[in-house]
Amino acid sequence: MAATEGQIAAFLDVAAETLDTVERVLGDLDDETVNAAPPVPGVNSVFALITHVGGALGYWGGSLMAGEDIPRDRAAEFHARGTVDEARAIVARLRTDLPRWAAVAATGIRNPTATGTTRRNAAEATPEWVLTHMLRELTQHTGHMEICRDVVARRAD
């Protein structure tokens, strides 16, 4: 099974729009607030969330689908700390890598046994499912970033 050109184009369009939203979130933060987590147990900082998104998309798109060897420490992603510029660099890498990874969806999955996820059924994933899952991860965590930004930056709008 393989994804169609239309599916790949739609994925890339929505992913680009969502990364634009991430950039706007980062534009509202500084190096302190990008690492601040709301005072709720289990909630992550914007920096941790963008690190996790980079890791998740790197695994699904890069390692599994495209067959690249992208090391991942999933547990460490949720404790990552850094600067706004480092977060922007993750977004820039995703903007570069996503089109290359998505293009592989037209031909299939290159490494169904790639490691780096907690999902037991990753080896059974189709390219269409992987694109959809990547988009889900990106959009879900972007919403989390927006809420976190609103709380830590005390936004009223």
Image (tube, rainbow, N blue to C red):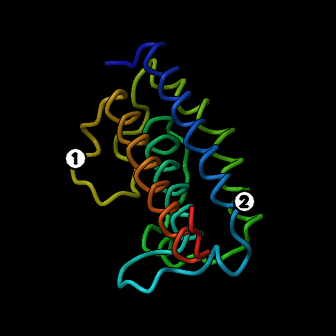
**Residue 153 at x, y percent in the picture:** 62, 74
Instruction: Identify the image quadrant of residue 15.
Output: top right
Mark carried by residue 121:
1
> Nearer the N terminus, badge 2 or badge 1?
2
Of all residues shown, which one is farthest toward the right? 85
Mark 2 burial class by Cα count in 10 Å: few <14, some 14-19, many 20+: few
**Residue 68 at x, y percent in the picture:** 55, 43
Question: Quadrant where the N terminus lies?
Answer: top left
Q: Quick check: 2 left or right of 156?
A: left
Question: Residue type at mark 1?
Answer: Asn
Name the residue: 48% across, 40% down.
Answer: 61
Mark 1 burial class by Cα count in 10 Å: few <14, some 14-19, many 20+: few
Mark 2 secondary-structure assignment: helix
Q: Quick check: 14 left or right of 126?
A: right
Name the residue: 43% across, 73% down.
Answer: 75
Mark 1 secondary-structure assignment: loop
Mark carried by residue 65:
none
**Residue situated in front as seen by the camera: 40 or 126:** 40
Name the residue: 54% across, 59% down.
Answer: 71
**Which numbered mark, 2 or 1, is in the foreground of this view?**
2
- The total number of labels drawn is 2
**Residue 37 at x, y percent in the picture:** 51, 80
Of all residues shown, which one is farthest toward the top? 5
Q: Please give the residue where the numbered disc 2 appears in the rendered image.
A: 27
Give the CA distance from mark 2 to mark 1: 37 Å
**Residue situated in front as seen by the camera: 26 or 99:** 26
Question: Residue type at mark 2?
Answer: Gly
